[in-house]
Image: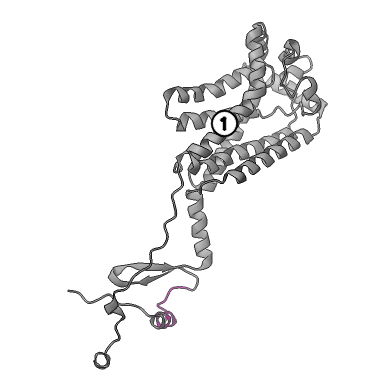
Amino acid sequence: MGEPTEIRTAGAARAEAASGAGSVDGAVRSVPTPDGASRTAQTRAAALRSRIREQRRNPSRPRVFFELALIGISYWLYSLVRNAVPEQAAVAQRNAGWIWHFEQHLGIAVERSINHGVNSVTWLIVGMNYYYATLHFIITIGVLVWLYRAHPGRYAAARTVLFVTTGIALIGFYFFPLAPPRLMDGGGFIDTVKVHHTWGSMASGAGAHVSNQYAAMPSMHIGWSMWCGLAIFILAKPLWARLLGLLYPLTTLLVIVSTANHFWMDAICGELCLLIGFTVSRLIYHNWAYRLPRTPEEPRPDQPVTVPAQWSAPVEASSSRR
């Protein structure tokens, strides 16, 4: 049998530190314990950093009232800022002309042909008008609720992606006002909401008086729909649900072009905003949103180190004289 493990008393530790063999002040100190176990003593700052790192790698379960308040306030601020951007009609028209000519140079300026072709099928274009006005919000809120209930460990990171994407879009709305195709002077596009007298578009009819009509770049219809589609495709189990996740952003792209609400370039910039959102979330949580644990791991309390009774027995005087 080997000799018993040595227990360092507080005095011995202080003596060792004074002789230069101890650890540097403020660093993590490992204290040997019986049976080869060890306990790590950390400063408060180190413990806080460790807890923050753990929280970022394993987000805690979200709280429903906090999330509802956060989403409500965030959407209110988004609407407020979006509609507070000055409607610079001349600049927006100039930017629209530049985008249209740039797409013609690239050979992808087919939005007008699609707009006129789909508009000739009344039932289809009316359905697209309602799609554009409603599903943008309904599907996004539905996916948020689904993530909250079924994937609480991934919810915070996924929500961060959505918030960052939307925040970047607000910057685009401010610095690059853009007239949508249906409002572009001389573009020859059809405003399908006006022509078919459908309700719901905040960019046409009565809604135009309370909405910034030149907040078209980037397209958040595409940014949000791709966020929803990726979440469904990656996390859903039924094959039919995953296929719907793929079809949703593609259908949304067809709708925004057919209704003349966006150019192709608006959609591309919306995807770039989403990519930045995923990157920021990756930096914060040290992992991609959908690769985090599905449910948060419950924190394990520190187990106290127990010492057998014989280790606490006083040392005999005769032993000390040896």
Q: Residue at x 70, y 19 (%)?
A: 100
Q: Answer whether residue 271 is visible to the viewer in this image.
A: no
Q: Quadrant of the C terminus?
A: bottom left
Query: Badge 1: how crowded within 10 Å, few (<14), some, or many (20+)?
Result: few
Between residue 34 and residue 301, name the one nearer to us: 301
Q: Residue at x 78, y 14 (%)?
A: 186
> Can you name the residue that lies furthest to the front here?
65
Q: Is residue 169 left or right of residue 238?
A: right
Q: Residues in magenta?
A: 14-24
Report helix, strand or loop for mark 1: helix
Q: Is residue 79 above or below residue 62?
A: above
Q: Is residue 104 magenta?
A: no
Measured from the top left, where is residue 317 in percent x and y? 27, 93
Q: Residue 91, located in which quarter of the rendered image?
A: top right
Q: Is residue 269 above or below residue 155?
A: above
Q: Give, as a three-letter code, the residue at label 1.
A: Gly
The residue indicated by pointer 1 is: 142
Q: Quadrant of the N terminus?
A: bottom left
Q: Residue at x 42, y 26 (%)?
A: 238
